Image (tube, grey):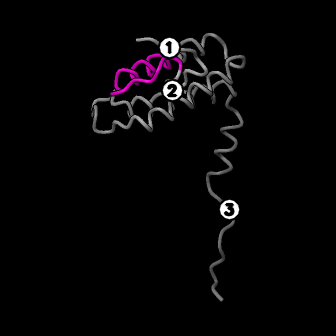
Amino acid sequence: MSDATPSTENPGFDDMARDIAEVPAVEVIVTVAVNLMSAAAVKLGLTEEGEQHMDLDEARKLVQALAGLLDASATEISTFHASPLRDGLKSLQLAFREASLVPDEPGHGPGEKYTGPVYG
């Protein structure tokens, strides 16, 4: 038998849980939305590295998830938070349409089932 006993404590986990417990839900939603927007921008090639990380299939998934989150949380977050997020989503949808070799029909692009058709 070993003298070393496995530690069941997870240092930092309790601190993280306590920190998360203090964050308002709106802030969590906005943070997740901003992370989805940032990831989508990278996959659309809109960063300094440009097309190095471009992946339209991945971008489609991220934009779709962002649109779903914004649609589902529309009544939970204020217009103060929702307006810039919706503007960012529309910009990503337009960038996706421009980057696509064969653009989706209006209303069938990523997230458009939640936002309605996006025209360039």
- Specify the quadrant that holds the N terminus: bottom right
For residue 4, which quarter of the picture? bottom right
Q: Earlier in the sequence, mark 3 or mark 1?
A: 3
Crowd tier of the residue under label 1, counting other residues whose Cα lies within 10 Å: few below 14, some 14–19, many 20 or above: few
Q: Nearer the viewer, mark 2 or mark 1?
A: 2
18 sits to left or right of 52 = right
Is residue 118 or residue 9 the one in the foreground?
A: 118
Residue at point 71%, 37% (across, down): 21
Q: Earlier in the sequence, mark 2 or mark 1?
A: 1
Q: Determine the CA span between mark 2 and mark 3.
A: 43 Å
State yes or no: residue 94 in magenta.
yes
Q: Amino acid at mark 2?
A: Pro
Q: What residue did someone put label 1 on?
A: 87
* Residues rendered magenta in the picture: 88-107
Q: Are marks 3 and 1 in contact (CB under 8 Å)?
A: no
120 sits to left or right of 117 = left
